[in-house]
Each structure stands twice: as C-alpha cells, then as structure tokens.
Amino acid sequence: MTDIGVGILGGGYMGKAHAVAMSSVGAIFNTGLRPRLEMVCATTPESAERYRAAYGFARATDDWRVLVEDPGVGAVVIASPQETHREIAEAAFKLGKPVFCEKPLGASLADSSAMVAAAEASGVVNMVGFNYIRTPASQFARKLIADGEIGEITWFRGEHTEDFLADPQAPATWRTTGMANGTMGDLAPHMINGALALMGPIERVMGEYETVHATRPGGEVNNDDHAQMMCRFENGAMGQMYFSRVSTGRKMGYAYEISGTKGAIRFDQEDQNALWLYRMEGPEATRGFTKILTGPAHPDYEPFCQGPGHGTGYQDQIIIEAKDFLTAIESGEATWPTFRDGHEVNRVIAATLASADAKAWQNISDF
C-alpha cells in the first residue's frame, strides 16, 4: 500500500464529509492507495485550525495557494464555494495534482469549460462530486437499464425536491442571492447528472423557473425557488424534471421513474436502500412492482455491511466517491464522472435557463 497526502479546501458541511470519507475509505474498501489528511484550508486561520483539530489534519492554512503548492499534498479536494473552483483547479493541474471538485463545476459555463480544458491538457485524474447517483440502489438501476432488463426506455421523470426554504419567513441568506446559489445552480445539477447517468445525453430542453417568495426577512431574493423542464434524450425518450427548495414536506426528494418496453423502475432517496422494479412478465393478476432491498449483491454495498436490508447512508455515498477517486489516481484511468461530465450538466442548465428566458426549446449542442 502507498499513502497520499490529501488537501481539502473548505471545512464546512462538505469539507467535513470528505475528511471523514478520506479517514475511513481505506479500512472500508481496502484501497491500494491510502489517503493521509495532510492539510485543510478555510477562510481564516482560526477556522482552519479548528477544522484541523476536529478532523485530524496534520496542518492548516487560510491560503488555498499554500495548500495546492505544498509538496506534501498529492491530491486536492475542492469543497469551497463555486466561484473559487476554477482558479484552484487550474493551479492544481499545472502542478500535476489530481483534483476532486464538488458540484456544480465552477460558477458558470465558462468556468467549467475552462476547467475541462485545464484538466484534459494536464492529463491528470479529475472527478466531480455527484454522490446521490452512487447509492447501491441507483448503481443497480443503471446496470438494469444498461443490461436491457426493462427494454427500450421510453420515458423518464426526475426530481430533486427539498423544503429548506418552504417557509416564507425563513430569513434571506447567501442561498437566496445569485443564480449560482438558486435551485437551478444548487439542486438541479444532482438530478440532471442522474438523468444523464441513467438515460444518456439530452438533446434538447424546454424550461422555466420562478421565485416563489421574492422577499424574506433580511432581504430580497434574486434567484429561483423552483424550476421545471421537459426534455428529449438522444435515445428518443421523453423526459421531465422538477427541482425545488420550497417543496413542502420533501426533505431529500431525489427521485426518478423510468418506463421501458419490458418494465419500469422507481427510486426515492428518502428510502435510499430500496429500488422498485416492475417486469412485464407472468400472469397479469400477479404483476406488480417488487421492492428490492439493497444488500451485498448490489454495487459497493458489501464493504459496509454483510447483511441485506441493513442499508447505507449519506456519508457512505461520499466514501464511495473517495474510493473511486483513489482508484482513478492509482490506476491513472479516468473514473466517471469526470470534469467533462460535470460540464455536460452545466450545459443542460445553461440551455434550460436560456429556454426559460426565450420561452422556446433549446438544443444542448448550442451551449
């Protein structure tokens, strides 16, 4: 086994998740490459030191350049705000260091385009963080579809719905300022990535977005509370998606339904250890959706638990990402989703926003 020093930019919600993942991934998956928490970067020396002590990093800094350029840091994890992604990633690639970047990739389509160019020019491993599609259930759904188990796909419906801003009296925060922090910038990328993973490329879209609560205690809201889109996939299937942070009662509504000529699939992240499968076979009287509880027979489940139905959780999805990132570094071979995959999500988002403004269908190839 070989160790590698990991530097994490950001120590908040996702920074902590990645630190925990890097601390435990070797024991869970017995990876050949073992990460060492070398350095954490935060906005102030005090917060950086606090994260260092809490998560077990060797060192801390409040300057991202110090982290990226440090010889002890062999791989970089970017868990800082979107507007910081591009500069950090480009600097790391120039030094030949692998980069894992949280979604969405950069703060704009121009950012992600430049980041893809830098990544591919460097030839260094790069990966973008879309964790929800990595549940054992959704990985199994991808396999069922790829193996033709539900036939030719005809229709897709997806959503990413939460209610953390459903209360109109919830105060204005950074989340209510700037389109990059709105629903299309924050929640939509996860389900769009999921749709691309399950269904393949999107050909064209028709979208609209809306601010439901334009004024909140403490300020005005200048980004979208919810959005919807129709789409046509390159495989010919029709699709629709809905994204919301004001969907009352929904806590983690990453859900999808997929219809095929031989069957159908349903999934809801609020019950993430179950996949519902319908097969068009046998007598009509006994047909119906079967609830499949994930277990050791499903992708990336057994390293966590040997008992079916016991389940995995949110943190486990981040650990699976860490395993995939380390495997890519060790093998030198790209692992999905790369920066280019993240950029594809941004292209769909840009086309959807343009569609809403123009009130017309938009082709993804134009973005």
Image (cartoon, grey):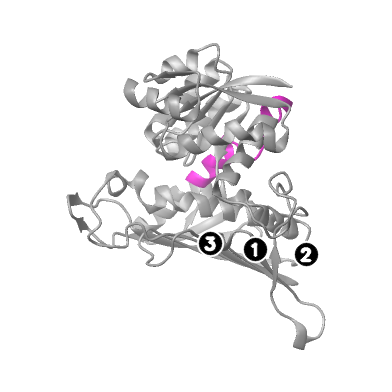
Q: Is residue 278 left or right of residue 354?
A: right
Q: Are marks 2 and 3 in contact (CB under 8 Å)?
A: no
Residue range of the region highlighted in magenta in the rendering? 328-346
Give the amino acid type for the residue marked by disc 1 in the picture.
Answer: Ala
Q: Main secondary structure of the magenta part?
A: helix
Residue 342 is one of the magenta-drawn residues? yes
The answer to whether residue 200 shows anywhere in this view is: no
Q: Residue furthest bottom?
A: 285
Q: Which residue is mark 3?
A: 270
Which residue is depicted at the point 62% across and 25% down? 35
| Residue beneath disc 2 | 149
Residue 230 on image: x %, y %: 49, 64
Q: Considering the numbered disc 1 on the image, is that residue within a helix, a strand or a loop?
A: strand
Is residue 211 among what the camera can see? yes
- Of mark 2 and mark 3, the one earlier in the sequence is 2
Looking at this rendering, what residue extends furthest in the right direction? 282
For discs 2 and 3, the disc positioned in front in the rendered view: 3
Whole-angstrom CA distance, mark 2 to mark 3, is 25 Å
Using the image as rendered, state which of residue 80 and residue 343 is in the foreground: 80
Measured from the top left, where is residue 255 in percent x and y?
54, 62
In whole angstroms, how far apart are the C-alphas of marks 1 and 3? 9 Å
Q: Which of pointers 2 and 1 lies earlier in the amino acid sequence?
A: 2
Q: Which residue is mark 1?
A: 274
Q: CA distance from mark 2 to mark 1?
A: 18 Å
- Mark 1 Cα within 10 Å, few/some/many (few <14, many 20+)? many
Q: Residue furthest top?
A: 71
Q: Quadrant of residue 261?
A: bottom right
Magenta residue check for 26: no
Whether pointer 2 and pointer 1 mark residues with C-beta atoms closer than 8 Å, the reply is: no
- Across and down, in percent, residue 126 comes to 59, 30
Kindly identify the amino acid type of the residue bearing the numbered disc 3.
Answer: Glu
- Name the residue: 60% across, 27% down: 120
